[in-house]
Amino acid sequence: MKKLSVIFLLFISVVQFAGAAVTKQEADAAYQKNDFSAAIAGYEEILATQGESADIYYNLGNAYYKNKNIAKAVLNYERALLLRPGDADIRFNLEMARSKTVDQITPTAEVFIVTWYKSLVNMTGERNWSWIGIFSFIFCLFAVTFYIFGKKLWLRKVGFIAAAVLLAVTVCANIFASDQKDELLNRTGAVIMDPTVSVKSTPNESGTDLFVLHEGTKVFIDDNSMKEWKEIRLEDGNVGWVKTSAIEVI
């Protein structure tokens, strides 16, 4: 009898939680009514209870942008792009939000091959690269079958070329998926959340002020070993120390 009572109470709790949980449709409706504060609260609750989602991060970024909170908009667009790097809409809105920030950082020039490689990797996300690798390997096996058992010379040639190409695609897709997964698991990007931050030469208040950053600026964490301070690097190569409370990891 006690077991039945416990099960019944658990069932009631689950039903009440499900009834109280905000749905994406409700948050979207609040956004469409220009009630951006309610939309923000709804999207934040969905992320807290249901986990990460590129769509929710994107919608949350839009709501923050409409609510004039550029730093939070940049942060959530960055998170959405991290989950779905090939999405042109997310990238466009991110660039639009970043254009509203005070600090306009010019990235250091990269070797062409590095830029090309990053663009190729970021064409799609880790999951899609994984599926591409799986299907390429399956088709590679079919091509090998044609090469080994094909009775005509042209069929064997086609099988050999196709197998070589598909094997290369399989290897590249797995490498790209691994790079994407590593970026998701070991996040070094962060966004300045305080209105104004003085970047120090050393991890303490007595350090020399090197330069000033403003909210919404993207940085990269180079040294994450300290609790209260982080060594950050800008896209233009400048480095320094900021308080952990001044940034939020993407």
Image: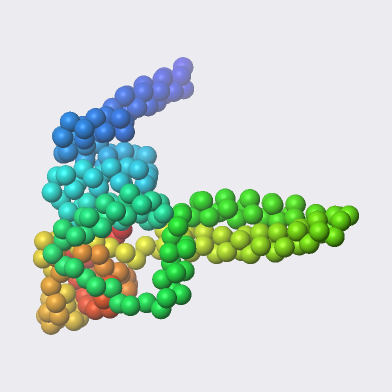
Q: Residue at x 16, y 67 (%)?
A: 103
Give the answer, above or below, for where 40 lies relative to 158.
above
> Could you tell me if residue 29 is visible in this image?
yes
Q: Residue furthest front?
A: 154
Q: Residue at x 46, y 54 (%)?
A: 125
Taking the image as shown, residue 115 lies to the left or right of residue 139, namely left
Q: Residue furthest right?
A: 151
Q: Residue at x 24, y 61 (%)?
A: 191
Indicate the colouring scheme.
rainbow
Q: Residue at x 47, y 62 (%)?
A: 121
Q: Measuring from the top left, give residue 18's x and y in whole percent.
A: 34, 27
Taking the image as shown, residue 140 lies to the left or right of residue 62, namely right
Image quarter of residue 212: bottom left
Q: Residue furthest top?
A: 1
> Could you tell me if residue 79 is visible in this image?
no
Q: Measuring from the top left, give residue 54's x and y in whole percent.
A: 36, 47
User: Looking at the image, which is closer to me, 49 or 106?
Assistant: 106
Give the answer, above or below, for where 84 lies relative to 246.
above
Report the quarter where the C terminus lies: bottom left
Q: Measuring from the top left, give residue 131's x and y in whole percent.
A: 57, 50
Give the answer, above or below, for where 90 lies relative to 178.
above
User: Looking at the image, which is closer to me, 60 or 32?
Assistant: 32
Image quarter of residue 109: bottom left
Q: Measuring from the top left, give residue 37's x and y in whole percent.
A: 16, 39
